[in-house]
Amino acid sequence: MKKVVFFFPAFSSTEATAPLGILAVSTPLLRAGYEVRIVDSTITPNFHKRTLDELDDALCLAISLVTGPMIRETVQIARAAKKRYPDKPVILGGWHPSLLPDQTLAAECVDIVVKGQGEDALLEIVQRIEAGESMRGVAGVGYKEDGKLVFNLPRTLRPIRELPPKAYHLADFDAYERVCGRRWAMYTSSLACPYSCAYCTNDGVYGRKWNALEPAQVVEETSDLVERYGLSLLWIVDDNFMVDRERVIGIAEGLVRRGVKFDWSIQSSTNLVSRFSVDELKLLRRAGLSQVSQGADSGSAKVMHLMNKDFQKIETIYTAADKLSQAGIRPSFNMIFGFPGEGESERRESIALIMDVCRRFPGAEFWTNIFTPYPG
């Protein structure tokens, strides 16, 4: 048996596309001669039966998830897999087990967890399973031994330039288009963020060591991805795309020269967006940038301080909205309500900010979030 089965549980959304984390960890497996099967419940009819059937001649089941509704299907599939194939390990990776490894591994239906980057860890796990060997010493991995939870030492983070390319050829973009109405994909050009916002889970996995691909590689990979699979949109899921200003301009210039037409969206902080000129942002728009999602987070200076966001002034929210609007790029903002220390007056300041920005810049949009605590 040289097959690994991945299950990807659904988000509570129809805005689905290929699971980037699974595509990332699949490449080392494929290079090592393993067969990979991905069952995404969003696009797979009878996904429960399909997953169990695929497991019949497989080494193990691997599931990637973030905290929230995805846990429900994860538990259903993991329990069913252990009931039918008690000797085949169930492995969990992604943000949820990375941030809550003890709680995740304690579940009866989970055998192994991966904390942090999984490209190297999962390959080692699968090789150990195939050889019938213990997980002892596999960095970044937790497992069960004689009924006890065992956690190995953390795995050293690898810079994004050293990571293998994602296995996009495994994605069924036709199926995603049928379900969601458009062809799009996620892409990563940098990892981590240099800032230390108190609400961010990023530090729990990537630390604060921002690292990025060179502009030429980003231009080549994104253009090829769009052309190869007929995509209309790329969501560049970097935590903070605009950290290096020259790199951003280099990517835009390269995409304009390449001439491949597609929309792309990014995430960045308002202080970094506002340092670009309108002309520079217009260059980004010519390159296809259609939306910038930014962490406005609060309209209260007090709450911003509690969030450890003194680097971002509230005025930069207005500056970013103004410049992006002039450039023809949609300014999008995230807000957080319920952060510790926020009271009624601070909430009203945030609501006033939302209303004022939307009145001044009709194209702006806000997404509201409720603060949710994680350990640490």
Image: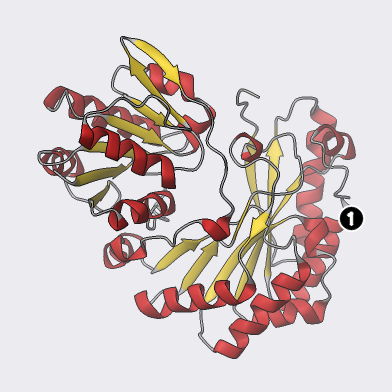
Instruction: Say if 197 sits above or below 375 in the image.
Output: below
| Residue 326: % across, % down | 78, 77
Count every numbered label the image shows and give the total. Answer: 1
Residue 237 seen: no
Instruction: Say if 60 sits above or below 286 in the image.
Output: above
| Residue 170: % across, % down | 29, 61
Which residue is more in the foreground, 152 or 246? 152
Instruction: Say if 69 sits above or below 317 in the image.
Output: above
Which residue is more in the foreground, 186 or 181? 186
Q: Quadrant of the C terminus?
A: top right
Residue occupying image coordinates x 82% and y 71%: 276
Which residue is more in the foreground, 254 or 342? 254
Q: Which residue is mark 1?
A: 315
| Residue 277: % across, % down | 84, 75
Instruction: Say if 145 sits above or below 95 in the image.
Output: above
Which residue is more in the foreground, 106 or 332? 106
* Residue type for callout 1: Glu
| Residue 249: % across, % down | 72, 76
In the rendered structure, the answer to whether residue 40 lies left or right of residue 299 reads left
Residue 6 seen: yes
Residue occupying image coordinates x 81% and y 77%: 278
How packed mark 1 is, by other alpha carbons closer than 10 Å (few <14, some 14-19, many 20 or more), is few
Q: How is the image coloured?
A: secondary structure
Q: Quadrant of the N terminus?
A: top left
Label 1: state its secondary structure.
helix
Residue occupying image coordinates x 67% and y 38%: 200
Residue occupying image coordinates x 61% and y 29%: 372
Report the residue that reaches farthest toward the top. 147
In the rendered structure, the answer to whether residue 88 lies left or right of residue 185 reads left
